[in-house]
């Protein structure tokens, strides 16, 4: 007897188109912009993948720089707790995408800033934390911590997906539709929106591509990890034109309003 597993790839792409803008705004506006305003600073510019804050001293400005990552951590932990309590297939899947995706983004920032020295956690000239002493030591620490935590997150993501889908080769199609469809929709959507940015290609590479195509790349490994004995569980995600339409509309609005800014 074959256990029913049905996952619609277009609905997963819809979730990618929906969550990428929402989670990006959570990082930029809920993190950077909120930290700027709450400390008495002025948001001189807010774009799809960046916030420019003015009027703050060194340490308050540093808090603005790391605030995006901090709210990512908070949302990831909150979604993880809710995922453990959820029972509905669709609810568990969306919460899994959020907690794992946000965690991937956090360690993606660590790795990116560690390697390049720029970005929210960068300590090289041009980085948000360039004034920190022992810049090379900071960068090495970011790389080591980022890589180690990334490996742990991939394993945790696989275990969590096993909890929903079961194990074995029979779960491979569902795994790939879930992880790879979401990854491609999120990453390509972010890259395309980033190309509209008037600041230039650097923003696309540093923020859009690095945080989405790079940061979420762990979903690729998760999608291929169909190991263990064949013990699939019933798991059904049917096509939802509502999710697809709302996702496409959200991505379009995000691109038109914040993309060119």
Image (cartoon, helix red, strand yellow):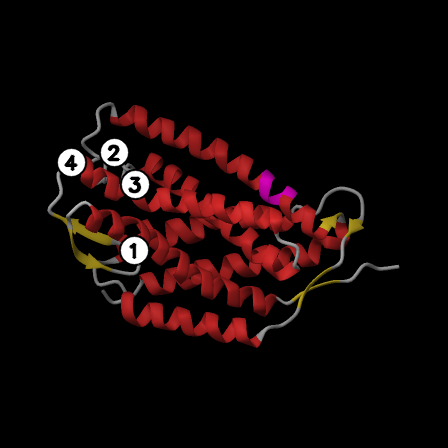
**Which stretch did the figure color magenta?**
155-159
Q: Is 157 covered by the magenta stretch?
A: yes
What residue did someone put label 1 on? 29
What residue did someone put label 3 on? 66
* Nearer-the-camera pick, 29 or 216: 29
Residues packed near mark 4 inside 10 Å, few (<14), some (14 to 19) or many (20 plus): few
How many angstroms separate mark 4 from mark 3 (CA)?
13 Å
Image marks 2 and 3: residues in contact by CB distance under 8 Å:
no
The residue mark sitting in front, 2 or 1, is 1
228 vs 117, left or right, is: right
Residues packed near mark 2 inside 10 Å, few (<14), some (14 to 19) or many (20 plus): many
- Which residue occupies 50% across, 37% down? 150
Position in image of residue 195 (x %, y %): 31, 63
First in residue order: circle 2 vs circle 4: 4
Tag of residue 123: 2
* Nearer-the-camera pick, 156 or 34: 34
* Nearer-the-camera pick, 227 or 37: 37
Position in image of residue 34 (x %, y %): 26, 51
How many angstroms separate mark 2 from mark 1 (CA)?
23 Å
């Amino acid at each position: 007897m074959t256990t029913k597993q049905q996952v619609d790839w277009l609905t997963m792409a819809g979730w990618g188109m929906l969550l990428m803008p929402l989670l990006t705004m959570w990082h930029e506006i809920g993190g950077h912009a909120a930290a700027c305003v709450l400390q008495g600073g002025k948001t001189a510019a807010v774009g799809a993948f960046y916030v420019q804050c003015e009027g703050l001293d060194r340490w308050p400005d540093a808090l603005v720089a790391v605030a995006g990552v901090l709210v990512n951590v908070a949302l990831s932990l909150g979604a993880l707790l809710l995922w453990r309590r959820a029972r509905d297939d669709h609810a568990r899947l969306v919460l899994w995408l959020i907690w794992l995706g946000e965690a991937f983004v956090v360690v993606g920032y660590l790795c990116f800033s560690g390697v390049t020295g720029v970005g929210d956690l960068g300590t090289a000239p041009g980085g948000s934390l360039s004034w920190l002493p022992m810049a090379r030591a900071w960068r090495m620490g970011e790389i080591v911590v980022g890589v180690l935590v990334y490996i742990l997150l991939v394993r945790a993501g696989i275990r969590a997906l096993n909890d929903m889908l079961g194990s074995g080769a029979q779960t491979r199609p569902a795994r790939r539709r879930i992880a790879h469809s979401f990854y491609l929709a999120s990453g390509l959507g972010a890259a395309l929106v980033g190309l509209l940015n008037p600041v230039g290609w650097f923003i696309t590479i540093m923020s859009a591509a690095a945080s989405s195509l790079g940061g979420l790349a762990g979903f690729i490994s998760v999608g291929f990890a169909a190991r263990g004995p064949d013990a699939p569980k019933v798991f059904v995600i049917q096509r939802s034109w509502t999710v697809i339409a709302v996702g496409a509309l959200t991505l379009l609005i995000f691109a038109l309003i914040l993309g060119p800014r």
